[in-house]
Amino acid sequence: MTAQNLPGSSIGSAPWTSLKIVGGDVGSWWSASDGALNDADWRPRYKRLNSLHVILDSTRRPVAAPSLFLARIGLATRGVTDDSVRTYAECLISWSKFCADEKLYFLDAREEDLQNFRLTLYNNLSAPRQRSTAGVNLKLKVVVEFYKWAQMQGFRTSLGGFLQSEEFDKRRALGLRPTVRHPRGLGMEEVSRILGLAKQPYRLAFKWAITTGMRRAEICRLRVSDLPSQAEIALSDDGLVKLPVVRKGGRLTSVYAPVALLEETNWHIMTLRPAPQPNGEDYVFLNRRGSPVSRSSMSKHFRQCANAIGSSATLHWLRHTFAIQLLTILERSGSGNNIKIAQVLLGHATSATTEIYLEGMSVTSEAVIEALSFLYGAGPND
């Protein structure tokens, strides 16, 4: 298959954009795509996707190869959100912008173009939203994966051929050394000040994050029907109640919530929660319009509260704080198998992820802070 006869692949220097089609609109989009993507390629394999990310060219027509690639990613992912597909789309759009700047059609890209893309990303590390080598590595990984997949699907390119060759497999010189970032937590005073500024329902949502270690997506999806009844709460003899939650990757596990948090949540539902819209009856956290709170609005409100106290923390730091405080208390109490306990409570698939928080706990301990402060004081003053 050549560039000239690829459906929906008009050649031009303008970068791509992406379009997200959700739920029932996916079927309608097939008819409106004007034959740009062959039904034989799309309908049988991808028609059951809850959402579809389509790459569009400058004329707003779908570009076949990257759109089919994103559909394949959507089919393979186990997550309950479309974050992975959206991230892949953003990486491909970044590559298309580079190609547009270079006046390069994406199917004509060669090995040296990918190397120049890597150098461009590396030189822009100081730019906003691009501050880690991990982000560079991710964009390179997605582009490499796309061209290797395209090569196998009949979208033959010089770059795809090189990436599948033994020469590339031996060299593997594209990636950068990732920046190691230790998890950072908040002090209890900072947490208290942020909660004091937060408005409902976000204040209660933040309490769920700091008390259970749940991610923002998990909190936004929390259902009234998932909460234990008053009778189940009354039967708790250790102050904790287990409830089901769909974790990252679509895994159904459990979280353990303090009785006091559940009682406050039930009170919120009965007295403070806005009247729900038809799509929001079973959601715990609703906005003023009665629709489920979104992840972006939750992060935005946290950012406002953090800015107000002069903190650079992000919402995910509440999960870090939960993990670090949990491990600190477990270490202090001398209980055994601390990592396994924390792994269960955090919902990590492997203990290796949980062990990262041990490093965060160690590098932010009082002893380390005291030692570094002493060393700083021993240096010359400006």
Image (cartoon, helix red, strand yellow):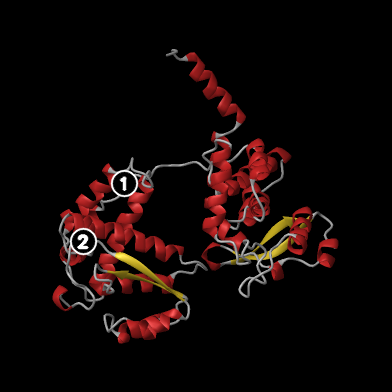
Instruction: Look at discs 1 and 2 and give the one toward the viewer.
Output: 1
**Quarter of the image holding residue 332?**
top right
Residue 117 at x, y = what percent? 23, 52
The secondary element bearing badge 2 is classed as: helix
Figure quadrant of residue 159: bottom left
As drawn, the label of residue 176 is 1
Residue appearing at x 56%, y 27% in the figure:
369
Quadrant where the C terminus is found in the figure = top left
| Between discs 1 and 2, the one toward the N terminus | 2
The residue lying at 32 percent from left, 74 percent from top is 68
Within 10 Å of disc 2 (Cα), the crowding (few <14, some 14-19, many 20+) is: few
In the displayed structure, would residue 60 be above or below residue 219? below
Three-letter amino acid code at disc 2? Glu
Q: Give left or right: position of 130 versus 49.
A: left
Could you tell me residue 9's position as x and y percent?
21, 73
The front one of 52 and 319 is 52
Residue on which the image places disc 2:
166
Q: Is residue 351 visible?
A: no
Residue beneath the point at 43% across and 63% down: 84
In the structure shown, which secondary structural element does the residue marked by tag 1 occupy?
loop
Q: Classify 10 Å Cα crowding around label 1: few (below 14), some (14-19), many (20 and above).
A: some
User: Is 119 on the left or on the right of 361, as rendered?
Assistant: left
Image location of residue 49, percent across then percent down = 45, 77
Amino acid, disc 1: Leu
